Image (tube, helix red, strand yellow):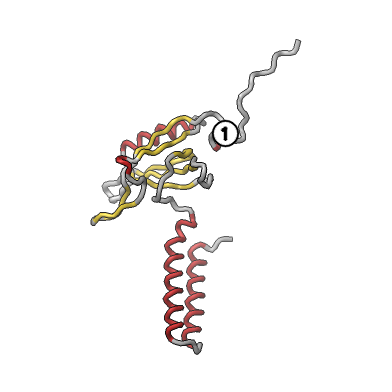
């Protein structure tokens, strides 16, 4: 059973109610009460902003340098609605120190990236695992949101895909390597 956002709101109400009761009916000094209110408010704001990461929403933070592509979805820009366009993809970081569990990522839509991801998606559809690698222009951070006066976005990234060696992909971990057929019985 999951409560979703209604459970989160209920938890906020319970904590805020307990704080009000302690603030009104306790004999604690006002400075201690004010500190409790400030800490509780900060904790609730922190929880609110960290909750989407717990839900598995796509991240715009550092993209892995090498990864295995598991799937992707594209939303092209729409001039009528003003939607900016996104490329979402699910990948496993191939770094030795990485967690090894799939993660959802988001990058800004770009026609060049669209072509690269579509080609990789076509190969995935043919059961050919794809290994991606990222190159940052001018050694800049990859996929890190940046702020300018007009809004937010990401620095551009260049993605290259190649076929993974047989048996190394997530789909091929349980697949034994191919063997020669047994010779016919005499």
Q: Residue furthest right?
A: 186
- What residue sits 52% from the left and 29% below the top? 165
**Which residue is situated farthest in the top direction here?**
186
- Left or right of residue 41: residue 3: right
Q: Which residue is mark 1?
A: 172
Q: Quadrant of the C terminus?
A: top right
Q: Which quadrant is the N terminus positioned in?
A: bottom right
Q: Nearer the viewer, residue 181 or 162?
A: 162
In the image, residue 79 sits, relative to residue 50, either above or below, namely above
> Quick one: SS at disc 1?
helix
Q: x, y (%) of residue 31?
A: 42, 84
Q: Is residue 143 left or right of residue 164?
A: left
Residue 168 placed where, x, y %? 55, 33
Q: Could you tell me residue 107's position as x and y percent?
A: 37, 45
Residue at left 42%, top 70%? 42
Q: Residue furthest left?
A: 149
Residue 26: % across, % down: 51, 87
Q: Residue at x 40, y 50 (%)?
A: 61
Specify few, some or many for label 1: CA neighbours under 10 Å numbering under 14, 14-19, or 20 or more. Answer: some
**Could you tell me how many numbered marks the image carries?**
1
In the figure, 15 relative to 143: above or below? Answer: below
Q: Quadrant of residue 110?
A: top left
């Amino acid at each position: 059973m999951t409560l979703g956002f209604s459970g989160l709101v209920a938890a906020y109400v319970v904590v805020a109610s307990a704080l009000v009761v302690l603030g009104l009916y306790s004999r604690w000094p006002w400075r201690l009460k004010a500190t409790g209110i400030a800490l509780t408010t900060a904790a609730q704001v922190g929880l609110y902003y960290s909750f989407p990461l717990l839900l598995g929403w796509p991240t715009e933070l550092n993209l892995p340098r090498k990864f295995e592509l598991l799937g992707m979805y594209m939303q092209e820009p729409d001039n009528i609605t003003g939607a900016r366009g996104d490329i979402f993809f699910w990948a496993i970081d191939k770094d030795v120190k990485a967690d090894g569990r799939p993660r959802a990522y988001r990058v800004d839509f770009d026609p060049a990236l669209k072509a690269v991801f579509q080609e990789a998606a076509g190969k995935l559809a043919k059961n050919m695992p794809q290994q991606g690698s990222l190159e940052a222009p001018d050694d800049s951070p990859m996929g890190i949101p940046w702020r300018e006066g007009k809004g937010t976005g990401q620095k551009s990234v260049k993605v290259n895909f190649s076929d993974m060696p047989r048996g190394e992909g997530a789909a091929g971990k349980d697949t034994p390597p191919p063997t020669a057929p047994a010779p016919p019985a005499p």
